[in-house]
Each structure stands twice: as C-alpha cells, then as structure tokens.
Image: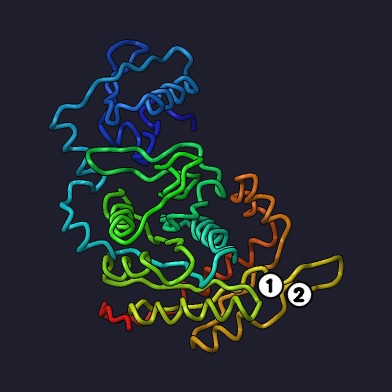
Amino acid sequence: MSMSIEDIVYPGFNKSLKELNSLKKISENTYEVLDFTDIEWVRSALQESALSISNSVKFEFRKPTDVEMNDVLKKIGADKTPDQIKDAFNDGKRVIGISSGKGGVGKSTVTSLLALAYAKKGKKVGIVDADIWGYSIPKILGAKFPPIPFSNRIFPSKINDLNVISMEYFVKQDEAVIWRGPMLHKAIEQFLFEVIWEDIDILLIDMPPGTGDVSISLSQLLTFFETIIVTTPQSNATLVAERAGIMSKKVNSSIIGVIENMSFMKVEDSIIHPFGEGGGTTLSEKLEVPLVGQIPLDKLIASYCEMGRLQDITSHKIFEDILEFSDKIDKIAPKKKPINLKIN
C-alpha cells in the first residue's frame, strides 16, 4: 500500500499529519501544514517526506492558533501540569537505572543493547543519558537529529525506535560539563519531567559511575526505580560495583540483577578470559540478586559502537543473548520500597 501525504509522521511527535489534524489541502498540489515547532530542519524534513511521495507537492507552513496548539497538547499528552507529570511518572512504565561502581565497564553499551532488545520485542523505549559528564548514548546509537522544543517541553531525540535525551545535545563538542549538586539535580529533573515521554513502556537511565549526586537525585525525584549493576570480571571492578549496589539499597532502589560485561573472548574454537572470571557471580551473590547474563568482549559490538551503528547488532547471533537478558529482567519482580533517604 502506498503512503499518502496525510500519513507523513511529524518529526518528534510520533504522530501523522492526519492524527495531529495539521494538514489542509488548499490546491491540487499545495497543502497548508501547521508549524508547531518553528524549526527549519523540521519543516525541511516534512517537505522532503512529501516529495518522496510526489515530486509536485508543496507545503506551506502556518503558525497554529491557541486552540490548535491546545488540541495538539492534549493529543500527545503534554497538557498536564508539572505536579501531575511527577505524580503519574511511574504509572504504566518501568524505570530502570543502569549503574556501575567505576567507569569503563561498558555501562552505556549495556544500556543501549538492552534498549535495542526491548524495542525489538515491540516495547516503546526511552533512554535518559544521565551520565552528565561522560555522555555517549547518542554517539553509540548514531543520532541524526536533536530533541525538539515544544511548548515549554521537549521531545526526545528519535533514534530508530528509541527515544533518547542526553547532555550531548546541550553542550558544544569541545566543552566540559563542570556541574555539582543543584545543577545536576535540576538537569535530571528536566530530563525526567520536561521531556515528553509519550506512552513509553520502559525507561532506561544510563547512570554516571559511582555513588554521587545523580543517584541521590533520582531517589528524591522518583517514587520508585529499579537498578541493574554492570561490572567486569576483575575483582577490583566488582568491589567498586558492590558500593554502587550498597548505595542503591540506601536510597531504597530495588536492585534486580547484575550484568557482567567483557566476560570472555571467543578466539577460533577457544574461549579466553582476559580479565579473569567470576566477578559477576561473586557480586550477584553478595547483593543477593540474579546474574542476568554475561556479555563477551566482542569486536563486532565495539566496532558498531564506534561507528554509531549499534542497532546493526540486532541482525547478528550475539544479539539473541541480549534478548534473553531482557526476558530474564521481565521475569524479575522488583521489591518495591517507599523512598526513605538516609545516607550515613
């Protein structure tokens, strides 16, 4: 079935021109389109989509009236007050922080792989790249377009079937983020509540390494969230990761499992363990949670991350293991606790 002009999806909104009631035919080949964002690349993307259907179609853009804007706000669920958004944030979605004790264990890669697995299973997935100082999710996934501001809120960047927000979109490439407490807290609050996370099933939060401000902020902002701890097999990595687990318990997040990354390498017909063995098992036993799985040190994963094409891993056999990890996570029932922040 061929696509029609009214079926064109409005960038960021994840709804068609017809669904948004934003299209009006004014002549044989000319259409009036409501310009909700006043962003040039959004207009260009819409026009290019139209030309791909018919090379004679022309769009003329018009600013929406207040009535039209309010109608769209309701359709995308962005008409709620800040308090309503916060109160209902956990409703209908699972919020999982991906944490580690130290940097360099592949936490962002694990977050992205799990996100791709859930998307492959038909889930609507959001990613908060909360590693404010070491953001990398957009690069790993190959982001092409930035988030879209809309009516004092913001649509996340759409990367294939994933919805992503990251500090990368808000700082220059050669700038460092030099933030502490209140500024970090505000950034996390905006990422959670000012981004339009429309109808997502699962929100994965790529946490910064360690046990600092971001973990505390999440515990204060969310009524409940779960945590997966990522480690490598080395004993020093698991010792530090254990502290991240202890931190999660202190802020009453439910630790649901451990994932061991860079566990082994396949060399011809042999398996070698360049970083030792057993770290993930030891950590899961200490934290009294399941070992969700082990991810190998794999050249293909590393190459796709470097090229910004990690989504291409979904067609390879190694991705079957990641799908199994997501199945295991689905079966783990979180132990809900009221937030009661006490840090000694």
Residue 5 pos. (x, y %)? 39, 25
Who comes first in sequence, dot 1 or dot 2?
1
Q: Quadrant of residue 307?
A: top right
Residue found farthest to the right: 269
Query: Residue 263 — which label?
Result: 1
Q: Nearer the viewer, residue 253 or 68?
A: 253
Residue position marked by numbered label 2 in the rendering: 273
Q: Nearer the viewer, residue 239 or 60?
A: 239
Q: CA distance from mark 1 to mark 2?
A: 7 Å
Query: Residue 214 — which label?
Result: none
Look at 34% across and 57% down and name the residue there.
184
Look at 51% across and 40% down and name the residue there.
174
Give the vertical position of 288 relative to 207 (above or below). below
Give the class, few, some or many, for how many residues have Cα within 10 Å of label 1's Cα (few <14, many ≥20): many
User: Please, what secondary structure does the residue beneath circle 2 have?
Assistant: loop
Q: Nearer the viewer, residue 301 or 27?
A: 301
Q: Is residue 133 visible?
A: yes
Q: Are marks 1 and 2 in contact (CB under 8 Å)?
A: yes
